[in-house]
Image (cartoon, grey):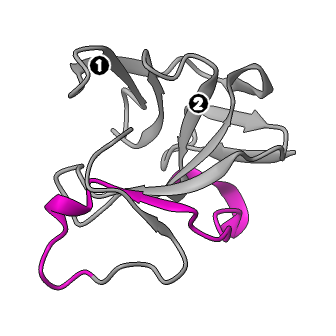
Amino acid sequence: MAKGSCMCGAVGYEYSTSIWLTTLPLRSGAAYTSNVVVPRTNFKVTKGSPKDYDVKGDSGKINKHWFCGTCGSSLYTELEIMPDVTCVKSGSLDGGAANHPVAVEFYTKDRLGYAKAVEGADQKPEFG
């Protein structure tokens, strides 16, 4: 079982260690965001009540972003286009649990000049 929380500890979650893949989408207002993709049925909030914010993705479908309403930590995303998985923000995992090989980088067309491709990861110019 892997666990995580926001920076202030108000919101906690856990998921079974059945990981589908680890991704680095390069489209987050930063160089990238690291996500661990897990079956949605294996993910649950165990403490607190995260806030959510909806964004329309390139597909036209909703990307629901969950975060702590107190400290603002980004926790996970649920994509309407991928209804069976939860994309957990690796930075919110406890104890360095984010040390999984990166399987794919999305939105490589938006890669910043100083960021290099992750060796061995599948490179996708867009999502999908």
Q: Is residue 38 above or below residue 103?
A: above
Image side of residue 97 versus residue 55, left or right: right
Q: Tell me where the magenta segment starts and ends, as one range.
A: 92-115
Estimate how packed mark 1 is, as few (under 14), some (14 to 19) or many (20 or more) residues with alpha carbons within 10 Å: few
Q: Is residue 70 above or below residue 23?
A: above
Which image quarter holds the N terminus? Answer: top right
Image side of residue 101 versus residue 2, left or right: left
The residue where tag 1 is placed is 53
Q: Say whether residue 104 is magenta.
A: yes
Determine which of the numbered discs, if any, sits on residue 23 in the image.
none
Residue 37 is drawn in which quadrant? Answer: top right
Is label 1 in a helix, a strand or a loop? Answer: strand
The residue where tag 2 is placed is 86
> How many angstroms separate mark 1 from mark 2 (CA)?
15 Å
Choose between 35 and 83: the one closer to the eye: 83
Image side of residue 59 versus residue 113, left or right: right
Which image quarter holds the C terminus? Answer: top left
Q: What's the residue at 75%, 47% (across, down)?
A: 19
Is label 2 in a helix, a strand or a loop? Answer: strand
